[in-house]
Image (cartoon, rainbow, N blue to C red):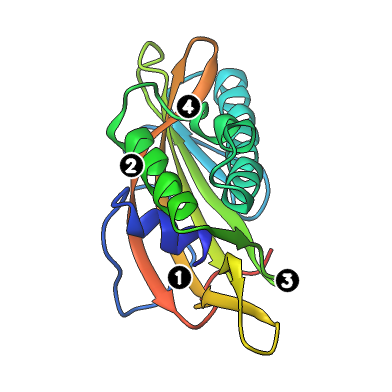
């Protein structure tokens, strides 16, 4: 099972659609300032340009931390030393944190683990920072292609080969909801805008 498939499986987000991702359009002209840092990242905000750019940088780093922590956790879902850093990236007590913890526990009980594929990647297409500077909230729109697998760590097939439980590749566009809490950005949920099995419909890196 891929990263995106696990996100969907623990009901963090919504459902998919038949149409593939297309490049995101610029926000409607509402008086918001739009900052761009590369071809795939934009920030819509009424904050000062410096504050918006810094928030965007921090959320981009948080998204990278999440990607790394997820891969580490899924590789050993029963090891608190490896799952702890992932769970620490969620708002404490949030439903999404509980859902992820429960899903990791189920995988550990089944003696399953996950491993990245060779072609997977993600692209941050847009970061939208809350207009209200006191809110400390941002949404990262991310398109992910994931070709990872879930495999049985306790058993082998009759010929001694690894038993692959799930190797379905999937691409998805997701709005990750980040909130600034205790001096850092933490994940508090999100929405899968669309998901597509067996193919990569994300823009190139």
Mark 2 nearby-residue class (10 Å; few <14, some 14–19, many ≥20): some
Q: Earlier in the sequence, mark 4 or mark 2?
A: 2
**Residue 68 vertical placement versus 201 (above, below):** above
x, y (%) of residue 108?
49, 50
Residue 22 is tagged as: 1
Of badges 2 and 1, nearer the viewer stands 2
Q: Secondary structure at mark 2?
A: helix
> How much space separates mark 3 and mark 2, taking CA atoms?
27 Å
Residue 56 visible: no
Looking at the picture, tell me which residue is in the foreground, 157 or 142: 157
In the figure, is residue 26 to the left or right of 94?
right
Structural crowding at the residue carrying mark 4, measured as other residues with C-alpha within 10 Å and reported as few (<14), some (14–19) or many (≥20): many
In space, the residues marked 4 and 2 are separated at their CA atoms by: 15 Å
Mark toward the start of the polypeptide (4 vs 3): 3
| Disc 3 target residue | 118
Examine the rendered structure and indicate whether residue 161 appears above or below residue 26.
below
Q: Which residue is mark 4?
A: 186
In the rendered image, which residue does mark 2 sit on? 99
| Comes first in the chain, label 1 or label 3 | 1
Instruction: Give the Cα distance between marks 4 and 3.
Output: 28 Å
Instruction: Determine the CA span between mark 1 and mark 3.
Output: 24 Å
């Amino acid at each position: 099972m891929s990263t995106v498939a696990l996100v969907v499986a623990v009901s963090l987000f919504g459902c998919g659609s038949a149409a593939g991702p297309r490049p995101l359009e610029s926000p409607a002209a509402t008086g918001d300032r739009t900052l761009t840092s590369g071809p795939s990242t934009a920030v819509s905000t009424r904050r000062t340009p410096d504050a918006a750019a810094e928030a965007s940088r921090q959320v981009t780093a948080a998204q990278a931390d999440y990607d790394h922590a997820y891969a580490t956790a899924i590789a050993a879902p029963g090891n608190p030393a490896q799952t702890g850093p992932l769970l620490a990236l969620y708002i404490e007590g949030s439903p999404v944190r509980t859902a992820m913890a429960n899903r990791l526990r189920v995988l550990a009980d089944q003696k399953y683990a996950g491993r990245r594929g060779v072609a997977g990647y993600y692209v941050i297409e847009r970061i939208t920072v809350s207009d209200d500077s006191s809110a400390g909230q941002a949404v990262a729109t991310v398109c992910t292609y994931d070709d990872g697998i879930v495999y049985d760590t306790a058993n082998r097939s009759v010929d001694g080969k690894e038993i692959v439980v799930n190797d379905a590749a999937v691409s998805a566009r997701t709005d990750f909801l980040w909130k600034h809490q205790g001096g850092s950005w933490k994940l508090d949920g999100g929405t899968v805008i669309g998901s597509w099995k067996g193919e990569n419909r994300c823009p190139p890196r």
